C-alpha cells in the first residue's frame, strides 16, 4: 500500500501557532519534506523543530524550490519534487511536507500535491494559521467586521487596481514591489499596517505607509483597511 502525502502548515513563524494535528503528524511519521536546498536552514524547519524537537532525528528530504517567475524552471522543480516524493510514497511511507502558514494559501506544497494526486496517490492538506490572520492579531486589528469584504492579493505578481473595491485588503508577497505598493497605498487613503517576519525574532510592525521601508523583506504582509468615516 502506498504512503500518503500530508501538506502540513506550520503557521507564520511562532511555533506556538502550530496545531496539535501538525505536531502529532510530525511525531508519528519518519519522512519530512521541506522546501529548500538545506532542510535545517529553511524557515519551516526552524519553526517546527522548536515545537517538535524530535524533528531533528527524522529523515529530512530537502526540495529545492527557488523563488522565480520563470515558468519553465518552476515546472521543472515541481516535477522533480513530485518524482522524489513518489519514490518514497511507493515504498509505503507517508511524507509530511512542511509549509509556512496554511498549505491552501499560495503554498509551494500545492504544486507537488496536485501532481502526486494526479498520479493516483492519496494526499491530505492540514491547515495551519494563515500569515494574514496572525499578522492582524499581532497588529491588534480586525480583518473584516459585520458585512465588510476582504480581498487578498499577491502584490509581488499583480497590483493593477487602486484598491478601489469596498472592504479591506491583504497584500501578500509585497517585498520586491514595495515602492510601487506604498505609492498605491498612499493614493488609496486607507489605514495601513504592515507586519514583517510575523512571529519571528526579527518581527517588526509598521503603522502607516510612510513608516514602511522600501527594502522590506519577502515575509512582509500589509493590511489596508477602509478609512474611518
Image (tube, rainbow, N blue to C red):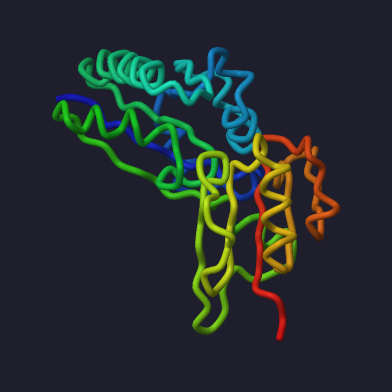
Residue 185 position, x and y percent, is 70, 58
The number of numbered discs placed on residues in the rendered structure image is 0
Q: Residue at x 58, y 57 (%)?
A: 170
Residue drawn at x 58%, y 68% is 168
Looking at the image, which is closer to me, 14 or 204? 204
The front one of 229 and 122 is: 229
Position of 108 relative to 170 (above/below): above
- Which picture quadrant has residue 75? top left
Is residue 29 found left or right of 119 in the rendered image?
Answer: right
Q: Is residue 181 left or right of residue 214?
A: left
When the figure is inspected, residue 73 is found, relative to residue 153, above or below; the finding is above
The residue drawn where x is 78% and y is 39% is: 214
Q: Quadrant of residue 71?
A: top left
User: Can you say which quadrant of the picture contains the C terminus?
Assistant: bottom right
* Quadrant assignment for the N terminus: top left
Location of residue 72 by image quarter = top left
Residue 129 screen position, x and y as percent: 54, 52
- How far from the left and from the top, in percent, is residue 24? 45, 41
As drawn, 26 above or below 211: above
**Side of 138 relative to 78 (left or right):** right
Q: Which residue ends up furthest to the right in the rendered image?
A: 211
> Looking at the image, which residue is at 25% across and 28% down?
115
x, y (%) of residue 130? 54, 52
Front residue of 27 and 48: 48
Amino acid at each position: 500500500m502506498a504512503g500518503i502525502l500530508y501538506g502540513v502548515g506550520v503557521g507564520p513563524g511562532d511555533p506556538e501557532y502550530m496545531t496539535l494535528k501538525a505536531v502529532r503528524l510530525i511525531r508519528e511519521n519518519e519522512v519530512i519534506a521541506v522546501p529548500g536546498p538545506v532542510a535545517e536552514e529553511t524557515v519551516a524547519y526552524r519553526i517546527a523543530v522548536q515545537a517538535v524537537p524530535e524533528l531533528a532525528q527524522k529523515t529530512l528530504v530537502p526540495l529545492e524550490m527557488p523563488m522565480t517567475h520563470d515558468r519553465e524552471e518552476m515546472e521543472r522543480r515541481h516535477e522533480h519534487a513530485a518524482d522524489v516524493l513518489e519514490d518514497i510514497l511507493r515504498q509505503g511511507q507517508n511524507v509530511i511536507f512542511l509549509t509556512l502558514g496554511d498549505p491552501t494559501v499560495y503554498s509551494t506544497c500545492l504544486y507537488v500535491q496536485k501532481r502526486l494526486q494526479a498520479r493516483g496517490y492519496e494526499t491530505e492538506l492540514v491547515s495551519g494559521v494563515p500569515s494574514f490572520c496572525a499578522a492582524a492579531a499581532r497588529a491588534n486589528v480586525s480583518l473584516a467586521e459585520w458585512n465588510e469584504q476582504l480581498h487578498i492579493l499577491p502584490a509581488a505578481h499583480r497590483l493593477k487596481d487602486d484598491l478601489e473595491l469596498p472592504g479591506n485588503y491583504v497584500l501578500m508577497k509585497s517585498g520586491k514591489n514595495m515602492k510601487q505598493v506604498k505609492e498605491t497605498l498612499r493614493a488609496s487613503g486607507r489605514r495601513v499596517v504592515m507586519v514583517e517576519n510575523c512571529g519571528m525574532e526579527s518581527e517588526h510592525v509598521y503603522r502607516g505607509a510612510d513608516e514602511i521601508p522600501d527594502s522590506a523583506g519577502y515575509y512582509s504582509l500589509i493590511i489596508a483597511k477602509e478609512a474611518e468615516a
